[in-house]
Image (cartoon, rainbow, N blue to C red):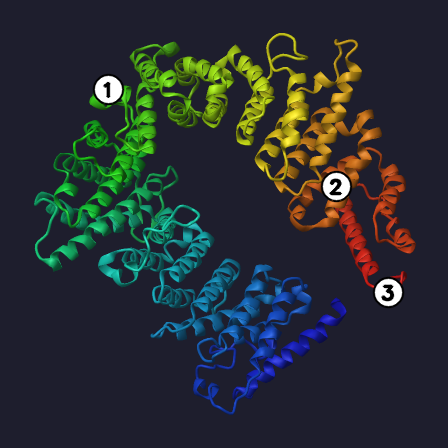
Amino acid sequence: MLKGVPQMLAALSAILEKNAQNEGHSNPPPSPTSGIPQTSALPDLLVNAHDVHTADKALDMEIVVKCLTTLQHLFSWLPLSSHVPPTLVTTVFYWGSVATQTQSKEAALAGLGGVCELLYRRYAPPSSGATALRLHHCALRLLRHLTHPPLLTPHDYLNKLAEFLKLFISLHFKRLEAEPEFDAIQFLSYLFQFTFQVPVCTIFVNCLDIWIQFIDILKPEDTVKYWEALRGLVEGILNKIQFQHNKAQLQHLDNEVYDDDGETEWQTFLKHCIECIARVAELAPLDVFTCVLERWQGLAGVHARAAGRGGGAGGAADGERLLCALLDLATLTRVAGRLAPALLADAEPCRTAAGADSAAARAAAGAALVERVAAALGGAALTRPHRAAHQHAHAHVQVHAEMFACMGAWCVHAAACGVPQHTVEGLLAAAVPFLLPHELPEPPLLCHAAAHLLLSLSKNVKFTGDPVAQAGDLFQHAQRSLHYLEPKSAGVVREALLWLCLSRLGPGGAGPGAEAARALLAAWTAPLPLAGPAAALPPLTALLHANKHAHTQAKKVIAEGMGGAAETALRMLCEPSCASAEPEITEFFLALFTALLPQLGAFAYTAIDVFLDVAQRGGGESGLERLVECVRLGVEAGGGCGGGGGGVREAAVLALLQQHALPRATPHAPGLARAAHRLLASLLIHRWRYFFPTKCVGEEEERLQQFRGALSALGRALLQPDIELLRININALETLNTKWKLYHKPIFRSEFLGEFLSVLLAGLGEGGARALLRDEALAAAHAMACVDFPAFRLAFLPHFLRQLPGLQPDHLHQLQQFPPDTDLPTFTQNIQRLMNDVNCYRAYSALSGAPSDMLS
């Protein structure tokens, strides 16, 4: 195919250049040896734009689009340095720049798409320097034109241009800095104008990706050189996200409909903008934080004055301005919270245009923010301005919710900032009132934000006094009920209060903190017999998930407190009257085993015996899946062998798998299939000696039969279309071979080696989703083949190829000439070439009337 490529490219290039000349330009794009002109390197449509639309120019744009689309495909696989001349790249970019001058949006998109396809190939051979500089001049000219209002270019073209600029900067910007003709500041200036003139926020977000790519390639010493551009970027983004400066665009962003990621259009836009500011802050933390804080303080003053007069404003105009100020204060508060890690990072001070940042200056700036927000939240807890200001109630709620969230982020750094203890305690005192019951319920958003601040305080702050006493009435309400809060907020409060107690554990888990924690756990587990598992277990399950990474002493206290509930839930699991609550019970036990298995002692294995019995009675697939996961955790924890003494009974686990889990693990139940095969893999890996006992005389043959059944089930899974199931079992095979030399075992070599190799090689020939695991499958096939490589070449491969349909005898003769190389890289190339040839021969054989020797 490569032999015909030069002629093909020449033909395509000729068509494109001819059509460019037909638009009124006599000169084609210059050759790469003619030097890089200071002006445009392409025919400038901008100069003769009026000629493009004359009636007598009947351009065959359909042919142009097809040529450019063909080039896109060719660029995705051609050897670039030897086949793609710079003139062709320039021609393709020429067509990618005509969107604003002609009616052929398709040609412009196809042209830019072709250039992007080159850059995705990391187009940087030694000869590409001139092409890169030419692309810079082309991009600069295009940006210069696009930044002249009005910007009426189609949106999909602007997005494609943003994609090109991102690729160009990532690959060529640092290389071009050394070129005297490359003006980086000018390029960034036009990029800045383009970024902040795009017509909609979605395109603006794509432009931010360009700047993030630019920040990624900067070195610390580049900060001073480009600081003006970076500071302008931060200022521009801050203007972009504030209603006071950009209401026309922001008011059209939806903040009610959630996407698949659980975010609204406004939240997605704001997240990208804040992340870009945070990336700049990694280079100049104090400068960026100061810039944000100056704006924040002005708006905080407006908020304080509004709260002081009951949250309202004067006339309609004043009310509109106040609303914008409150919304912007909420936004900037979120920005300030996001900048905490960058401002207080442990790295060396960053040097910017403003001088050397000092750790003391950064800490002082952070402490000033915390003091101001703590005072605002303290006042809000007393005055509740969102209740008085009906017109702006939601805006006040957003402001205070963002302040709670911001302080949750800053609690991690309170000690580093030197925040006084009374200020931190003031934050606790400000959060608690929003978590207590009131005649007029607090907004759920505020309650949830206050709960998370309480959780952050409990995990990150060392209180000098008794935090349980400081929580006061909240501790008492938590012991009785938190039903006045939404379930998610109530769960966060429970976790926070438990952490407040566990943070004060004494030696050996003693002390008032342990007593308070046990009192809470006793109160939360007590309703189980009366309320039933469906109502009482989900809060306990959430608590277990939240504490799975707690320290050992804390886990011991939690396990003691959960013991009674666990025993009751185990009895309920066996009762037919509780069958409808099986999902809640099994979810509870999975969380219990995940978080506290080492602390459960003998109860864990008693529970597993019950799980094995319960699984045999049927039930839902999700319940069985969770029980299987619990059994797997018990298997991996160790203990016992052969069913004697404590521990997991391997024979019962195998029965569970063979008789219940695996038969129900159909493609319609992928979760159960994956759980069952994870359990099967764990059993083989962690209980290998059960299958090859040294002391269990008389059971050897029975256990070998069980081993055969386990490997057969593993092999069948390799044929399934589920890519995750394939990954689980290939990894299991590799672990078994690494740890236990599976491939060298006589039973595997004689009964399974050929079948497993056949499945792996056939999968490599299929392609599709299996290509995602090509490297893992090739590594497994290589390890199996190396057990006896001569036998693999001379016996297995001929037999394997004869079993494949659609191959003629002469095809088989050629395919069987497999090279003798045994190293993994060469073996990988040889196997891939073999399977490609197999697919090619079979495709030709499938053609109607194709002669058998057509490839000989």
Residue 738 % position (x, y): 70, 29
Tell me the distance, in whole angstroms, between the alpha carbons under discs 1 and 3.
86 Å
**Mark 2 or mark 3, whichever is nearer to me:** 3
> Sequence-wise, which precedes: disc 2 or disc 3?
2
Instruction: Residue 377: tell me if it is visible.
Output: yes
Q: In which quarter of the image is the N terminus?
A: bottom right
Q: Is residue 681 above or below residue 796?
A: above
Disc 1 marks a residue whose amino acid type is Gln
Residue at 58% in and 25% down: 618
Q: Does residue 400 appear to the left or right of 192 in the view shown? A: left
Quadrant (top left/top right/bottom left/bottom right) for the C terminus: bottom right
Callout 2 amino acid = Leu
Q: Is residue 686 visible?
A: no
Marks 1 and 2: which is nearer the front? 1
What's the mark number on residue 760? 2
Q: Callout 3 environment at 10 Å: few (<14), some (14 to 19), or many (20+)?
A: few
In primary-sequence order, the first of circles 1 and 3 is 1
Q: Name the residue under label 3.
A: 849
In terms of secondary structure, where does tag 2 sit? helix
The x and y percentages for residue 820 are 85, 44
The residue indicated by pointer 1 is 476
* Label 1 or label 2, whichever comes before in sequence order: 1
Percent coordinates x, y for residue 88 in the rendering: 61, 74
